[in-house]
Every structure is written in structure tokens, then in C-alpha cells.
Image (spheres, helix red, strand yellow):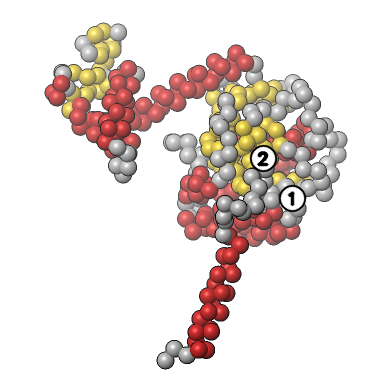
């Protein structure tokens, strides 16, 4: 029988269970402050206190240089009006420590980066209580992870953490379990310590997405993400908004290395405008090429209806959008591919077909017109 003691025990267990998540309840009257912006880029909030953010990019794109400006401006109580910090401004947090952990570079390069940061901030000698710089390149993966746990618990008053090489703390960037655990842990510590945690990660060269499962998890959970790109032909670098939770996308920043100053500097407005337009054109061409390769494959001819269906499936594989939206998008992409000389359309009506753009006798042909 169900006794009074059992009833009392059950009630006690329920109360104990409710206490576990009682503090997580939110009502329309809850006293919750908005996230405090910590780092802005061209006026848009990229990183906030109490949250994690990501900087992504290909190797040598300029990620470390961007972090240098984040660190330098965080050390400056008063920023000069003519300061060229690539549009990056970190809020001054008084005596709260700032911590930079480098897992990738040689210690000599870490020291060089530190000296550049101090010079930009107008500081002659490092205050190690205020700015703590660590190089963990030689530590094995497991020790890196253990050290990170201890560091976040030891320096609870730090306002900013910049960790260069987040995938070095997991056995594999594609390990779902360890990736989720690490991102969850960093989110927890950012909230508990009211700190901005900024993490650097490489991008996949094929699609520009952040590397591995840990990158996918980061895109879902982070408060902000920016991408650093480089045009090697023109020797220009770009800071682009990837995902900003609490702000509008900013106008991308264009910068280059200045040998005289020994650091990255912003380019003039005209150079910036031309470079951004070229980047936009290249990006659009790359996306169209990928769409063409995916949908046309090795086919030499396809009915337009079949080609359009393939575009629809590529655009919305789970059929979550309305049929009219899928069809409108696919028809627009067919026109874009034709305009960009990836395909040629022949015939008319239901008999219209799609063929790869042809080159005959050294001349390009489309719709039976020579160019």
C-alpha cells in the first residue's frame, strides 16, 4: 500500500528536484539586464560580457592581428580620436585582468604579438596582473583542457579571455561529444564570471564554415562570430560579420600590413570600396560555380524542369519552405547561372533544356549568339 511515509518521501523528492532548476525560471517580471557590449567592430557589437564569441578564418588570414587590436583597446582607458584599430573597440574594465592563451604559435611569435599590443596601447612595460599571456603550444591536448578548466576557475575576475586555437582542446574538431562539452563549459564560465570569451578557429577552405562539429556547435551557440579573409593577390585583409546576435551586420573592414608602422592598418575609403566590390563579385561567382557543379554534375543536357528541381532540393533539402518560394528561388538561380555563362538554355516552354555553356572555335556561344 502507498503509506503516508511514502507520500512524504515522494513530496520531499519532488521539492528537491524542483530546487535544481528553480533559479532558471524566467517571467516577464524577472530582473535581467541586457548583455553588456564588450567588443564592437565598426559600431556593431561582436562580443559581450557573459557570452562566447568566435573569430574564424583561414591560416595566415590575420586572425592574430585582429585579436591584437581587441587586447590593445581593452587596455586603453582613453582611446585617441585618431586611433586606427581597424574599427575594433573594446571597453575598458578597470583593473579586471585580461588573459590571452596561444596554443598555436611559437613562443617567440607570442612575445612579438604581446609587444605589438603594448605598443598600440601606449604601454611601456607589461603589468602581468592586468595582462596575462600564456603559450600552451607544447602541452598535450588533455593537459591543455585541464589547464583551461583550472585557469577559468583561478582567474574568475578576468573580464576578457582570448583563446587562439580552440580545437586544440579537443581530441578532434569533429568529435561531437567533446565539442559539445567544451562549448557548454565555456558558455557556463562566461556567464558565471561575467566575462567575454573570444575563441579563434580555422575555416574549411571549401565553404568558409567554421571547422568541424565544434564549429557547427559554435555557430548555433555563440553570441557573435566574425570572419577574417585575405586576398593574397592584392595583399588585402577583410573583417566580415558572420553572425551577430545583438547587432546589425557591420560594413566589412579592409586592412593591410604597413611595414613602416610594423602592424596592420586600415586602407583608404576608395581602396576599401573597390576591394569590397571585387570580394562580392568573387563570392557570388564561387557560389554559382558550386551550385552549377552540384546540380549539373556530369550531365551534358537536362530538361529545365529537372534542373530547376535539383536547385530546389539543394536550396531546401527538407522541403521546409513553400513550393512557390522554392520555385521562385530556382528560377532566379537559372537566370543567374545563364547570365554568368555557366549554362545555356535551348528550346522553349516545357521542352526547354539546360546545357553546359559551350565554347566553339574559341568563341563563347549562348542562345545561338556569339560573344
Most foreground residue, 187 or 147:
187
Q: Residues within 10 Å of mark 2 (few under 14, many from 20)?
A: some
Q: Nearer the viewer, mark 2 or mark 1?
A: 2
Tell me: 325 left or right of 89.
Answer: left
Location of residue 16 with respect to 281 vertically, above or below: below
Tell me: 310 left or right of 165.
Answer: left
Earlier in the chain: of badge 2 and badge 1, it is: 2
Visible residue check, residue 204? no
For numbered disc 2, what is the local secondary structure? Answer: strand
In the rendered structure, find residue 158 and report the number of the disc placed on it.
1
Disc 2 designates what residue? 37
Location of residue 201 with respect to 235 vertically, above or below: below
| Distance of label 2 from label 1 (alpha carbons) | 16 Å
- Residue 325 image position (x, y, % from top left): 31, 32
Q: How many marks?
A: 2
- Name which residue lies at 73% across and 38% down: 91
**Would you say the residues marked 2 and 1 are in contact, meaning their CB atoms lie under 8 Å apart?**
no
- Residue 102 image position (x, y, % from top left): 67, 46
Amino acid at each position: 500500500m502507498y503509506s503516508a511515509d511514502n507520500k512524504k518521501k515522494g513530496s520531499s523528492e519532488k521539492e528537491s528536484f524542483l530546487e535544481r532548476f528553480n533559479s532558471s525560471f524566467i517571467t516577464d517580471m524577472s530582473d535581467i539586464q541586457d548583455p553588456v557590449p564588450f567588443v564592437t567592430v565598426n559600431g556593431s557589437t561582436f562580443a559581450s560580457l557573459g557570452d562566447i564569441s568566435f573569430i574564424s578564418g583561414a591560416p595566415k588570414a590575420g586572425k592574430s592581428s585582429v585579436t591584437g587590436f581587441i587586447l590593445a583597446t581593452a587596455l586603453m582607458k582613453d582611446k585617441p580620436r585618431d586611433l586606427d584599430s581597424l574599427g575594433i573597440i573594446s571597453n575598458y574594465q578597470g583593473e579586471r585582468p585580461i588573459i590571452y592563451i596561444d596554443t598555436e604559435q611559437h613562443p617567440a611569435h607570442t612575445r612579438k604579438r604581446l609587444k605589438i599590443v603594448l605598443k598600440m596601447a601606449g604601454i611601456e612595460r607589461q603589468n602581468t596582473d592586468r595582462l596575462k599571456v600564456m603559450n600552451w603550444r607544447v602541452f598535450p591536448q588533455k593537459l591543455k583542457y585541464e589547464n583551461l578548466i583550472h585557469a577559468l576557475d583561478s582567474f574568475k575576475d578576468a573580464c576578457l579571455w582570448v583563446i587562439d586555437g580552440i580545437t586544440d582542446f579537443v581530441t578532434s574538431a569533429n568529435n561531437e561529444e567533446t565539442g559539445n562539452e567544451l562549448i557548454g563549459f565555456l558558455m557556463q564560465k562566461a556567464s558565471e564570471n561575467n566575462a567575454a570569451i573570444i575563441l579563434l578557429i580555422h575555416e574549411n577552405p571549401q565553404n568558409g564554415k567554421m571547422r568541424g562539429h565544434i564549429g557547427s556547435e559554435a555557430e548555433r551557440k555563440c553570441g557573435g562570430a566574425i570572419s577574417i579573409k585575405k586576398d593574397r593577390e592584392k595583399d588585402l585583409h577583410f573583417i566580415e560579420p558572420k553572425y551577430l546576435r545583438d547587432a546589425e551586420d557591420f560594413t566589412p573592414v579592409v586592412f593591410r600590413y604597413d611595414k613602416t608602422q610594423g602592424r596592420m592598418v586600415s586602407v583608404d575609403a576608395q581602396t576599401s570600396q573597390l576591394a569590397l566590390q571585387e570580394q562580392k563579385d568573387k563570392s557570388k561567382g564561387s557560389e554559382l560555380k558550386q551550385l552549377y557543379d552540384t546540380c549539373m554534375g556530369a550531365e551534358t543536357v537536362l530538361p529545365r524542369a529537372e534542373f530547376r528541381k535539383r536547385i530546389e532540393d539543394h536550396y531546401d533539402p527538407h522541403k521546409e519552405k513553400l513550393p512557390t518560394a522554392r520555385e521562385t528561388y530556382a528560377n532566379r538561380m537559372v537566370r543567374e547561372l545563364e547570365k554568368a555563362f555557366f549554362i545555356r538554355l535551348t528550346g522553349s516552354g516545357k521542352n526547354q533544356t539546360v546545357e553546359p555553356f559551350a565554347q566553339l572555335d574559341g568563341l563563347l556561344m549562348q542562345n545561338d549568339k556569339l560573344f
